[in-house]
Amino acid sequence: DICYQLLDWPEELLPGFTRRPGVDAWNVGFYDANNLEKDDDDFGSLSFYDTYDDAVKAEVEEAKDSFWPNSENNKHSLHRCSRLFPQDQDTGGFFVALIKRIK
């Protein structure tokens, strides 16, 4: 049973802030330490994978199935969440949601 509900973001909340809706689909990035750039302190190049299976085929040891979206995401209406990007209003980046307990 779902015990919470994501509420729509009220337009009057945080007036003047540029808000981007939440997403319910994404790919996941991992650093490849074997593919370093010119700097010795570089973490390696970042590679993105559409699915867990793609990451497993690429032998990404850190990959966990729970990093990728699943069919449950659409049920939760993640588009109602808000993402505030640092470049939009010269602030830090934030992910916020209005959650109502229903049970």
Image (cartoon, rainbow, N blue to C red):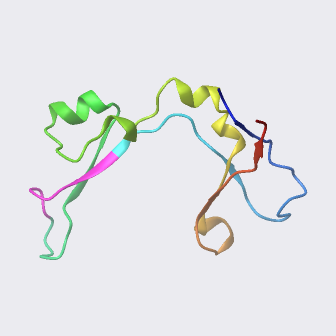
* Residue most extreme to the top: 71
Q: Is residue 35 magenta?
A: yes
102 and 27: which is toward the camera: 102
Residue at 72% of width from left, 55% of height from top?
19
Q: Quadrant of the N terminus?
A: top right
Q: Is residue 20 left or right of residue 45?
A: right
- Is 92 rendered above or below residue 22? below
Q: Quadrant of the C terminus?
A: top right
Image location of residue 13, percent across then percent down: 86, 59
Segment colored magenta: 29-36
Image location of residue 11, percent across then percent down: 87, 52
Residue at 12% of width from left, 76% of height from top?
40
Residue at 26% of width from left, 42% of height from top?
63
Residue at 15% of width from left, 36% of height from top?
58
- Is 42 rendered above or below residue 96? below
* Residue most extreme to the right: 12
36 and 7: which is toward the camera: 7
Image location of residue 61, percent across then percent down: 17, 45
Q: Is residue 50 magenta?
A: no
Answer with the quarter of the image where residue 65 lies: top left
Answer with the quarter of the image where residue 35 lies: bottom left
* Residue most extreme to the front: 103
Question: How many circles with numbers are drawn on the protein?
Answer: 0
Image location of residue 9, percent across then percent down: 80, 48
